[in-house]
Amino acid sequence: MHEKILEMKNVNKKYGGVNALKNVDFSLKRGEIHCLVGENGSGKSTLIKIISGVVKPDPGAEIIINGEKVKHLNPRESVEKGIQVIYQDLSLFPNLTVAENVAISDYYRGNIKMVNQKEMYKKAIKAMKKIDISINPKKLVRELSVAQKQLVAISRVIATDAEILIMDEPTASLSKHEINELLNLIKSLQKQGLTVLFVSHKLDEIMSISQRVTILRDGNKIGTFDASELDDQKIAYYMTGKTFDQNEKRGTEKFGKKLLEIKDLCKKRNYMNINLELREGEILGIIGLIGSGRTELALSIFGMNSPDSGEIYVLGERVNLNSNYQAIRSGIAYVPEDRLNDGLFLAQPISTNIIASIMDRLVNKAKIFQEDKIKKVVNKWVHDIGIKTDDPENPVRTLSGGNQQKTVIAKWLATTPKVLILDNPTVGVDIAAKHGIYNIIKELASEKLGIILISDEVPEVYHNADRILIMKKGRIINEVFPDEITEAELQEMVIGGEINV
Amino acid sequence: MSSLFKRNEFYLGLIILCLVIFLSITTNSFLTIENLLELFTSYSFLGIMAAGMLVVLISGGLDLSFTATATISQYIMATTIIKYGGNLFIAFLIGAGIGIALGLLNGLLVHYIKVHPMIITIATLNLFKGLLMFFSKGKWIYNFPLWFSEPYDIMVFKNSEGYIYPISLPLFIFIVVLIVTGFLLKYTILGRKIYAMGGNKEAARRMGFNLFALTLFVYGYMGFLAGIGSVAHALMVQTVAPNAIIGKELDVIAAVVLGGASLLGGSGTVIGTFLGIAMVAIISNAVILLGIPSYWYMIFLGAIIITSVSITAYNYKLNMRKEAEIDVA
């Protein structure tokens, strides 16, 4: 038994002219939970891919697994050495049963061989028992929730007798409650002797779970630290090379006219008796877990989820919002949570994305695009919002998560809205870009825009909103002002009472 | 039990049952062993190919060229046995061999070009069709050897009046193909890998499955069954013509999709495919027996496909809505 289950020395990887990894040394101690941290493009995924054998490092690198030097690591060999990766998309087969997904590694050998159904179910149930979960093994994976799917993916790793588990941002699409359960599960895996390499953007997760943290920046290893030596500020600094002031509070602003008023809005199985007000220049935070009705409410305000009853007023005028077209005309804009699917045309240029919702304003009388006008609009927003790109004609998918999110925001600001709804705007965005987005939000508010900031991250709402509504089970259960309570108290209000559900 | 109502096959079976009841009341000749055997015999070659299409669709692929593959197999098979003689086994061997070769070509192109298989197989459909016309000059072939024209009945029933009902070779092959394909898909590792590839190709790649081999197998199997089906067809009609099978590709795909296979890959069953073919056969039979103009066949088929697919889509939507519901206390 070697203390170091995995050791990598002198790892370089060049893609074309870009150094994705520069002279990186990395090691995993047997039985530890190790966090890998870095911004987008820092080389995290390249490092993972090298460990899993998908990408070959440049010559000169040394990889030692269990004390044994490995010459050419390929995916198959990596698996045989007990390394398993759970990718962000989980790599499950939605059309197959839970049992089949868990036991699928049995399909490696033989083609004409019969599948031993009994053996398969046994194996799957055994693996699930080991991590103390019970999901009906006959269910199709397609019918499971995201959190359950994650558990199936973990069970699959358990079923292969893996020694090293690599998890690539496993918490990205989970709610707070589910994240806590997942983190506890990972800790229990560690007790069973598994070594875990955990990739995350979220600082609180990193702090709560890991023993050691390796930080990468621009392909360089900044260092490997004991988790106890680090705090949020330090991690953020090592990741970006810049310091951030978490507590950039806005002064008590004077809010203007009432922009949006909602009275007794109800929709069956979505939300109940919603009343709220939003004024010019105000940032209204709405915090709630997935399933609290927050997104359903936001969609109703944006005309995409017609309420059963209740009234919506924009600038004192009663409006009926039965389509997003009507909402846009009333001056409401909505930045969706799932920007990749709902917010962007990934293959299209940045410019096209920015003008996507105002195309009808950029045509002449013959309904033909006025290129000069388009250019002006695009350049203005790329500059004002600070989208980092050499050319706005590049496809959006070439941008990092943070810049993609800025593009979505730019698209909606181009409609010159009065009310901007942001649904979890910093999901999957790294720390530096996160602060960039917070600054944009505050700036917009100071330009008299009314902003509804929906989130399940307590610090995000606490540090940015002027007033906070807490949603639970489709109702607004409380209204608080961040200067009157502490962050911990707010956290308690959001999570509390959730245990008995 | 509740899962039964979610299944496409259940609704399809229900519609077929209604049709059967309706037709046995309104006509005297529909629900006779004679009519049904004849009906299924005449659809057996399409059924054989539908089994191949099912496998292709489950894998996430598509093949529009199999009718051209079948016709080429038919021509080569027919000219060879006319010129050199042989027996039934050799006829099937030639048909299957040519089918597999052309199928593998499709598989190669699909894997290496990495363009949607619809585009690739439209291209090979045209390629095969053009080459066929060039070499055959569009001639029909009638003069099969005597041994090819004998009826090959596998089983013979007699009723009380001594009347004979044969289960013909094509129908027998159709049944065997359904059983083999069903077994392959459900119980072999190869079959489960094909489902896995159709469900999530990237995940299958990461699992280390050999996608190239799987793709080759899937299109090769389609070609194999196109070849077998084409010989069955020739046995049945005793002619080979350039336009006898070409043009039926959409009917086959419609029957398979009607049977619950998804064009997106990952789902479909042999029972569903059988029901799909049965549905298509029964509607065409109904139109003849009821003596209504034959374009009603197309109208009925279109309407039934839309209805069946809507029911599936509606069920799916209901499930999704159940998940999205929030427990408003």
Image: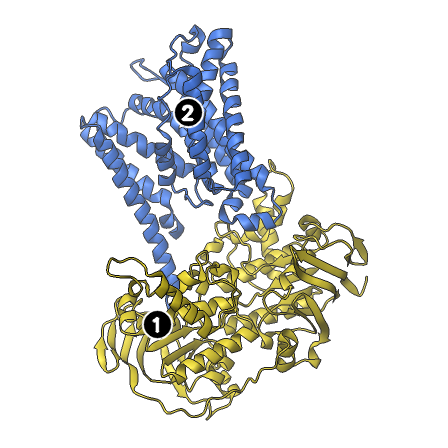
Residue A125 drawn at (x, y percent): 58, 56
* Left or right of B266 in this view: B193: right
Disc 2 and disc 1: Cα gap in Å?
A: 54 Å
Tag shown at residue A333: 1
Q: State the SS at label 2.
A: helix
Residue A432 vs A47, above or below: the answer is below
Q: Position of residue A124 (x, y in %)?
A: 59, 54
Q: How is the image coloured?
A: by chain
Q: Nearer the viewer, residue B132 or B213?
A: B132
In the structure shown, which secondary structural element does the residue marked by tag 1 occupy?
strand
**Residue, x 77% and y 51% (percent of image)?**
A71
Q: Chain of mark 1?
A: A
Residue A392: give its label: none
- Dot 2 amino acid type: Lys
Kindly indicate which chain is depicted in yellow in the rendered structure: A
* Numbered marks: total: 2
Q: Position of residue A490 (x, y in %)?
A: 48, 85
User: Amino acid under label 1?
Assistant: Ala
Residue B292, placed above or below residue B164: below
Q: Chain of mark 2?
A: B
Residue B129 is marked as: 2
Residue B292 visible in rendering: yes
